[in-house]
Image (tube, rainbow, N blue to C red):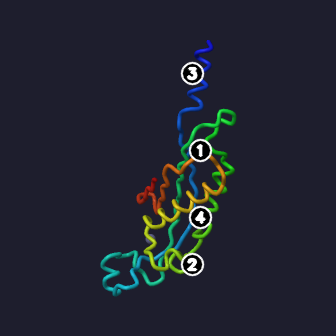
């Protein structure tokens, strides 16, 4: 009996799990390398090179990895997860990335670059939050239902 109880306790406290949370937001962007001619940009970026850009409904998925708290049964409190995700997307949500977000003044706001930007922001926010023993195992950013980018440490 005691053996089962202590094995149960060990399994609860030594394994790692991942918690995933999805968050929607919108951005505008255009793909353009400023040093290139319009012809070079059109050849490389096709429909993504447009005079004023276009919008997407993005879906962010964040995966948090850590041990289960033996008391709460959680990796991380969902209140903290939602606050971190809101803080992570705040500078880009509803914005034209090329014009309103300094990071993308000189960097093409591809799904890859946006995912990397959000991943770094989320990592910094998580560290600053004081939540311990939890890491961002993966961030997945959907630009559409059949196009997405994964970033992981
Ligand atoms: Zn686009």
Q: Earlier in the sequence, mark 3 or mark 1?
A: 3
The numbered disc on residue 133 is 1
Q: In which quarter of the image is ligand 1?
A: bottom left
- Residue 27: percent from the left, percent from the top? 54, 70
Label 1 sits on a secondary structure element that is loop
Q: Which residue is drawn at 45% across and 67% down?
A: 113
Q: How far apart are marks 3 and 2 (CA)?
A: 54 Å
Are discs 4 and 2 less than 8 Å apart at CB? no
Measured in 3D between alpha carbons, the distance from the residue under mark 4 to the one under mark 3, in whole angstroms, is 41 Å
Q: In the drawing, what numbered circle is on residue 8?
A: none
Count residues near mark 4 (Cα–Cα under 10 Å), then give few for <14, some for 14-19, many for 20+. some
Residue topped by disc 2: 100
Q: Where is residue 118 in the image (x, y as percent from the top left)?
A: 53, 62
**Disc 3 vs disc 2: which is toward the camera?**
3
Residue 7: image tag: 3
Secondary structure at badge 3 equals helix
The CA span between labels 1 and 2 is 34 Å
Front: mark 4 or 3: 3
Earlier along the polypeptide chain: callout 1 or callout 2?
2
- Which part of the image, by quadrant, shows the N terminus? top right
- 13, above or below 110, in the image: above
Instruction: Give the distance between the C-alpha atoms of the residues marked 3 and 1, in whole angstroms.
Output: 22 Å
Which residue, given by chain and number where applicable, does mark 4 sit on? Answer: 89
* Quarter of the image where one finds residue 45: bottom left
Dots 1, 2 in contact, CB < 8 A: no
Residue nearer the viewer, 25 or 90: 90
């Amino acid at each position: 009996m005691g053996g089962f109880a202590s094995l149960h306790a060990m399994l609860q406290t030594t394994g790692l799990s991942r918690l995933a949370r999805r968050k929607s937001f919108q951005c505008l962007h255009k793909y353009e390398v400023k040093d290139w001619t319009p012809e070079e940009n059109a050849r490389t970026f096709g429909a993504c090179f447009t005079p004023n850009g276009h919008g997407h409904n993005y879906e962010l998925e964040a995966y948090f990895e850590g041990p289960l708290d033996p008391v709460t049964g959680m990796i991380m409190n969902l209140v903290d997860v939602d606050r971190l995700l809101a803080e992570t997307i705040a500078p880009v949500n509803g914005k034209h990335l090329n014009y309103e977000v300094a990071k993308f003044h000189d960097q093409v706001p591809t799904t890859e670059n946006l995912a990397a930007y959000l991943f770094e922001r989320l990592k910094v926010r998580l560290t600053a939050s004081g939540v311990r023993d939890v890491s961002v195992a993966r961030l997945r950013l959907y630009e559409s239902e059949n196009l997405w980018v994964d970033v992981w440490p």
